Image (cartoon, rainbow, N blue to C red):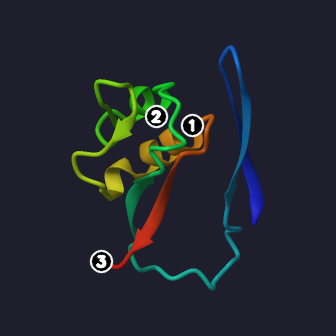
């Protein structure tokens, strides 16, 4: 895998670095089948920064206490990139995407 991009998220308490890697173009071991994901959150780790919801409000919602929740945890292929960016922006690393069978 080659490093494709480095994203830096800053707020007043944290600087969060995340390497974004993509498979090399020559890697033929990757299947062409569609992969689907669901969003998962550890609400006990959520600090309510709201970066996830500001990046991908279609997937991430904030309750009255400012903690993340999902109306539907399934991430459509169209929203996968934004949902992944929202999860990666979380300073508490309380959100991630899990692969599910279609």
Query: Relative to 43, is 71 on the left or the right?
Result: left
Check disc 3 and report its element: helix, strand or loop.
Answer: loop
Camera-nearest label, 1 or 3: 1
Q: Quadrant location of the N terminus?
A: bottom right
Q: On screen, 56 above or below 101?
A: above
Q: Which residue is mark 2?
A: 52
In x, y percent, where is residue 74? Answer: 29, 58
Q: At 51% across and 25% down in the image, what residue appears?
A: 49
Residue 70's label in the rendered image is none
Near-viewer residue (91 or 45):
45
Instruction: Mark 1 and mark 3 in contact? Answer it, CB < 8 Å.
Output: no
Q: Quadrant location of the C terminus?
A: bottom left
Q: Which residue is mark 1?
A: 90
Q: Earlier in the sequence, mark 1 or mark 3?
A: 1
Q: On screen, 12 above or below 92?
A: above
Check disc 1 and report its element: helix, strand or loop.
Answer: loop
Q: On screen, 34 above or below 10?
A: below
Figure quadrant of residue 6: top right
Instruction: Mark 1 and mark 2 in contact? Answer it, CB < 8 Å.
Output: yes
Residue 102's label in the rendered image is 3
Camera-nearest label, 3 or 2: 2
In x, y percent, where is residue 90? Answer: 57, 37
Separation (CA) of disc 1 from disc 3: 27 Å
Q: At 52% across and 41% down in the image, what residue appears?
A: 85
Q: Earlier in the sequence, mark 1 or mark 2?
A: 2
């Amino acid at each position: 895998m080659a490093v494709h991009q480095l994203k830096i998220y800053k707020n007043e308490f944290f600087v969060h670095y995340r390497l974004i890697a993509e498979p090399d173009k020559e890697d033929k071991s990757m299947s062409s089948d569609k992969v689907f994901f669901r969003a998962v959150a550890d609400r006990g780790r959520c600090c309510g920064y709201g970066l996830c919801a500001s990046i991908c409000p279609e997937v991430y919602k904030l309750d009255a206490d400012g903690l993340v929740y999902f109306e539907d945890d399934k991430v459509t292929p169209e929203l996968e990139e934004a949902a992944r960016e929202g999860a990666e922006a979380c300073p508490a690393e309380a959100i991630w995407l899990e692969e599910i069978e279609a």
